[in-house]
Image (cartoon, grey):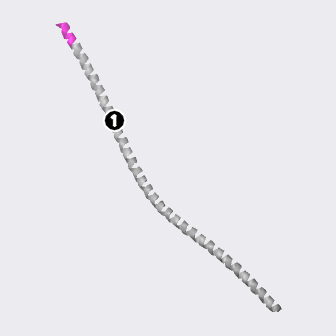
Amino acid sequence: SRKLADAEGVARFEERRYNTLEKEMGDWGSEIEDIEVKWLIDQGYLETCKVSSKTFDFEASQLKSRIDELEEEAKWCASALHRAQKKTEAFNNTAATEKSFNNGSAERSDIISTSEAQTN
């Protein structure tokens, strides 16, 4: 009977141990499922990030190209403006010289006309 009581005690102990392990395994299984779900969500997020990164890289490359074009256009405009300013300065200098020359001629004509009038 003592052997029977010992055997029953061992059986109860094994049953409790088995139930405890089964419960822990169930809890671990739930944790593993939660972790797998989170991992899948993270993988989806990472894939979205990779696609976004490639998209942003492409857009950045396009913007850099556009900036290069605009810088080239700005250089051309600055050069054209500089040439136009030089032409304007040259024109103004020429016009001032001609005006000065013409004014001098007009004064000589006035002097000659006045002299001729006095002689007559």
Task: Give the percent coordinates (x, y) of residue 99.
Answer: 28, 24
Task: Give the percent coordinates (x, y) of residue 49.
Answer: 50, 62
Q: Could you tell me which residue is drawn at 82 percent across and 92 percent down?
A: 1
Q: Is residue 23 above or below residue 62?
A: below
Q: Is residue 54 above or below residue 26?
A: above
Q: Is residue 64 above or below residue 79?
A: below
Task: Give the percent coordinates (x, y) of residue 19.
Answer: 70, 80
For this view, does 47 lie left or right of residue 82?
right
Q: How would you rate the neighbour count of disc 1 (Cα within 10 Å): few for under 14, some for 14-19, many for 20 or more?
A: few
Q: Could you tell me which residue is drawn at 34 percent across and 35 percent down?
A: 85
Residues 19 and 52: in front is 19
Residues 35 and 55: in front is 35
Task: Give the percent coordinates (x, y) of residue 109.
Answer: 22, 16
Q: Quadrant of residue 98?
A: top left
- Span of residues in magenta: 113-120
Q: Could you tell me which residue is drawn at 25 percent across and 16 percent down?
A: 107
Q: Quadrant of residue 12?
A: bottom right
**Label 1 belongs to which residue?**
86
- Looking at the image, the residue that sits furthest to the left is 120
Residues 115 and 86: in front is 86
Please identify the quadrant where the C terminus is shown: top left
- Looking at the image, the residue that sits furthest to the right is 2
- Looking at the image, the residue that sits furthest to the front is 1
At label 1, the amino acid type is: Lys
Q: Secondary structure at mark 1?
A: helix
For this view, does 56 lie left or right of residue 91?
right
Q: Could you tell me which residue is drawn at 31 percent across and 35 percent down?
A: 87
The reply to whether the magenta stretch includes residue 20 is no
The reply to whether the magenta stretch includes residue 114 is yes
Prevalent SS, magenta region: helix
Residues 93 and 23: in front is 23
